[in-house]
Amino acid sequence: MSEEELFTESAGQSIESKSRSRLGLIVTGLVGGSLVALYAGAAPFVAPALRKICLPFVPATTTQVENVLNALRTRSGTLVDIGSGDGRIVIAAAKRGFLASGFELNPWLVWYSRYKAWRHGVHRSTSFHISDLWKVSFAQYSNVVIFGVPQMMDKLELKLQSELPSSAKVVACRFPFPNWVPEHSAGEGVDTVWVYNAKSFQSLPHHRVTKKTASDNWDIAESHT
């Protein structure tokens, strides 16, 4: 093989090698960019779960939503979902005629809930607020829904007991309140709901909360629905 042919072959191999290198960089960049985009999109939903104390965002099942609505089937008026997540309880309640509101600390979930309410045509009878539950008064609501965790239920009893009107109903999902006696319950397992009458629990003495439950230790950003 002549010197010229050797040079041509070497140059060709060099160009091919550079092309493969560039292709590898492009593929790596695309994969990396996709992972970054995926993380950026998921982080607002996942990152709160990394906090020391939180309510994880666990979407309510269809059965849970139906159990809540069945528990309130004879009710009407205003309804609030504490820790409204992606808004499915609020939207479902609005479709049943309630003037429904949701409180959620995670802004991404709140914006998504508003979009869903608009898509379902119930944006005029729903409202979603970016707020910590401990900084909100629930005195204006006649129906309350909460998907809580055991560590917060004791303190939440005191808050609702002091704020709700005597005609209010409270529906607890997944975990019951520790000191209140429910009127009735429905469902089983994780789909169980407990229904409480404010007239009954308001007649109870205000118990002391002995657990460490300072309001600044609890987040409502990560919730259920």
Image (tube, rainbow, N blue to C red):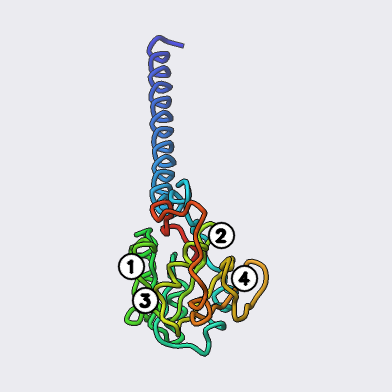
Q: Amino acid at mark 2?
A: Pro
Looking at the rendered structure, the secondary structure element under dot 2 is helix
Label 1 environment density (alpha carbons within 10 Å; few <14, some 14–19, many ≥20): some
The structure residue drawn at horizontal position 41% and vertical position 77%, both measured from the top left corner, is 164
Q: Are marks 2 and 1 in contact (CB under 8 Å)?
A: no
Q: Looking at the image, is mark 3 or mark 4 nearer the viewer?
A: 3
Looking at the rendered structure, the secondary structure element under dot 3 is loop
Looking at the rendered structure, the secondary structure element under dot 1 is strand
Alpha carbon distance from label 1 to label 4:
26 Å
Q: Which mark is residue 129?
A: 1
The structure residue drawn at horizontal position 37% and vertical position 81%, both measured from the top left corner, is 122
Q: Are marks 2 and 3 in contact (CB under 8 Å)?
A: no
Quickly name the residue at label 3.
Answer: 139
Mark before the other along the chain sequence, 4 or 2: 2
Q: Is residue 224 left or right of residue 30?
A: right
- Give 116 or 142, whichever is nearer the viewer: 142
Quickly name the residue at label 4.
Answer: 191
> Compared to 205, does 4 lie above or below?
above
Looking at the rendered structure, the secondary structure element under dot 4 is helix
- Give 43 or 67, whichever is nearer the viewer: 67
Q: Are marks 4 and 2 in contact (CB under 8 Å)?
A: no
* Residue 55: x %, y % from top left: 48, 57
Mark before the other along the chain sequence, 1 or 4: 1
Mark before the other along the chain sequence, 3 or 4: 3
Label 4 environment density (alpha carbons within 10 Å; few <14, some 14–19, many ≥20): some
